[in-house]
Amino acid sequence: MITEYRTFLNPKKVYLPLTDVDSKIAKVLVEKEDRVLVGQIIAYKYNGQIKTPILSTVSGTVVGFADKIDRYSKNVDHIIIENDMLNETTELKNYRKLGAKSQPRNFVHNVTTYEGIISTAQVRNKLRDLGIDKVAVDGLYTPLKFSATTKHIVINAIFTNEPFISTDYETIIHHAEAIADGICLLGIAASTESLTVIVDKFMPAEALEELGKAIVDKNIDLVTIDVKRVKAWDYKVIKKLVKKDLSFNLLDDGVVYTTINAALMTHNAIRKGLPVTSRQVAITGDGLNINAVYDVRIGTPFTDLVNDLEGYHEVENMNLHIGSFLSGIQLDSDDFSITQTIDTINVSEYREVEEDVCIKCGDCNDICPAGILPQNIMDAELRNVNLRIVDLDTHLCVECGLCTYVCPSKINVLEWVRRAKRRVG
Amino acid sequence: MKFKTKKPPIVMNSQSTFKRLYTLHFSLLFISIAAIIIKAYTIVPEGVIYNELDQSFKVFLMLITGAFVSVIIELFYSLSEGNTSKFNSYKGFVEPINTGLLIALLLPTVTPIYVLILAVVVGVYAGKIVFGGYGYYIFNPVLVGVIFANLSFSSQLVVTGTPLMMLKEALHGGTFTLTNMTELFVGNYEALAIGSTSVILLTFVFVYLCIARVIDLRISGIFLLTVLVMSFGIGYINFYVPGNFSGVFGYTLINMISGLTLFAAVFLISEPVSSPTSRETKMIYAVVVAVLMMLVRILGAETEGIVFAVLFGNMITPFINRTVKRSNSKTLLKTSISLVIIVLFLSVFFGFILQGSLSDIFASIGGALL
């Protein structure tokens, strides 16, 4: 249970991964012993089409490069920066108003900010320059990539995926105006009018009221869902917007789907000129002595946070889970650092649940939001029938994990469907 | 620090396979005890040497034997495999006991014990263990055992005077009047199966199991609905006297509440392992079973067609599983509409076959097909 709010903005060293699952090519711009400032571009990563900058999140000295696992459990190169605790900020390239003076190097006021209505290109460039790219990665969430085909912006105001929500409603209550503005800015970036916010029916009244007040005259639709009934609600909301079957990558359907944290970051970037140097991470689970919502510097090693939370409980088998419980991933080591894409981390005791045989009850077939038949796909995968896997439209699976959730035999159905999907390509 | 990477650290939904088996187990025990009590009050047929209490004891003995033999076979199989850890707790016994009890409940009171034992051996061994145990068989092992007993020992299992038999005679020219309705509902009469008589209890169990999600309403409900529609249609064509619906209602009612209709809806056709997996295929399966059952009841030599019908349904399950590829609203609508049309057409068709008017038509066009 989350009991407190904490900040951890001054780690001794930060470890920034140079590549991720999409962008596999990195070009480093700094060398060892170089001094870097907050917001300075230290590397670029490419995914074949787009280059994304990697910003330094602290000011200090580059002390070296190392192999480390990242939050996807892959071994990648990390750049290590030693923090000098000065928080000196670089002057960011921006579209300055004519006549505006350069401000002293103070974290908040160093750049000119945009007020009022601005153009699509300005928002897009600013987001790219400040390295706001991926904020949520689990399940259906998409990176903040805008193109001519982007038609809808969908914002999930529920912190993590259903059905286990640990929503941080404090953020909504305190920053409702900023969030609403961020959503509008995302709309400008995508040059679309279709803005949707998904909220929970059982949200605290205060949070809902604040959010409602903020978005009331901004032409944003509010969709209420009932999270007590497990059902792929976000899939259904987006399907209603798009009016066709969704593909695995929602960007192909012209939808940018993200969380309120992304909206907040967007607001901070455009209106205040802040690069993404910190983010909110909920750290939960019975494996830790204290559970807390952190405002943490990106690049902080997770072990530092664990020390700050007074260490692990002395339990034999532990389980470390990043992201949503239905579609997140598990790591076998805690030697990773916080990135922009981590929203929750759960460390808890591992409880073995015995798997029974599949009794072919068809519960997974009923719940599947994409309308495919996971049980039949699993069966085909077990029998290695490629033709049948193709026949069953396996490519429509969005890996939401509901089939695993409903299975009465506790089989990891999603894993089988994933395997089938990889097999046929 | 090393971590385990298996499944997410959450308790998945509260449903579990074992819980479902357990619910079924208790319903079966409930029905078994009810059967023993009811048999103590059922009037014995004329010309037999035993009395009502003996009859009740016989039912008790059958149920115990069925469950015991089934457990023994599974135990021997586990011993031969060298792994009996399954039987360390009561959990391992639930599934074999269910199978044994169901086989016993599906046989009449006159069944000799050796026939029951053979039926359980065939059902559990040839119907279940051969395929790999629970979760892998393709035919419902209960019905494999029952059909073996019914076909091989038909002379030992002769039952006369059940409501359905009287109805069949009525269809072929005999007379039949509905007498004691209360007894029909309580189940206080001689029937083809000892467990199938009490409509009230079976309805109660049906509702309970539906709520506990042990049985799928899309199979059992559509099965009952199809039987209702078809028997009403057939009854309307054959027994409708202008202004008087009592014949039609009587025919429908007997088809619904007597025989194995309700017992099958509760315990047989909604058995998950041998039935299809998606909602469209479940609907198709239910309709196929219901139609075949009605066909055997009307035209077949056997009184009760459900055993053949469900086994046929199991047989075509892999095929109908293959026909449906997506399970979205479009396919659901298409399947429902075609099934409604098929059921309505077939009920009229069967009605006319029963009436004999189709033979007239064939005769009039010069053929003698029927």
Image (cartoon, coloured by chain):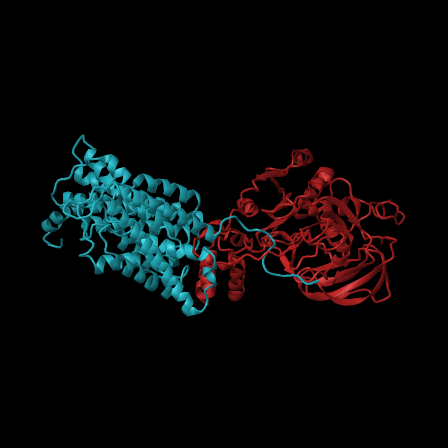
Chain colours: A red, B cyan
- Between A179 and A2, the one lying in front of the other is A2
Quadrant (top left/top right/bottom left/bottom right) for the N terminus of chain A: top right
Residue reaching furthest right?
Answer: A104
The image position of residue B284, as x and y in percent, is 34, 51
The image position of residue B36, as x and y in percent, is 30, 45
- Between A15 and A39, the one lying in front of the other is A15
Q: Quadrant of residue B178?
A: top left
Q: Is residue B14 visible?
A: yes
Identified at 77% across, 67% down, the residue is A66
Identified at 22% across, 61% down, the residue is B152
The image position of residue A54, as x and y in percent, is 76, 59
The image position of residue A172, as x and y in percent, is 70, 40
Q: Is residue A100 left or right of residue A122?
A: right
Q: Is residue A422 left or right of residue B123?
A: right
- Between A96 and B342, the one lying in front of the other is B342
In the displayed structure, A387 sits above or below A309; it is below
Q: Is residue A256 left or right of residue B220?
A: right
Q: Is residue B336 visible?
A: no
In the displayed structure, B347 sits above or below A403; it is above
- Between A19 and A294, the one lying in front of the other is A294
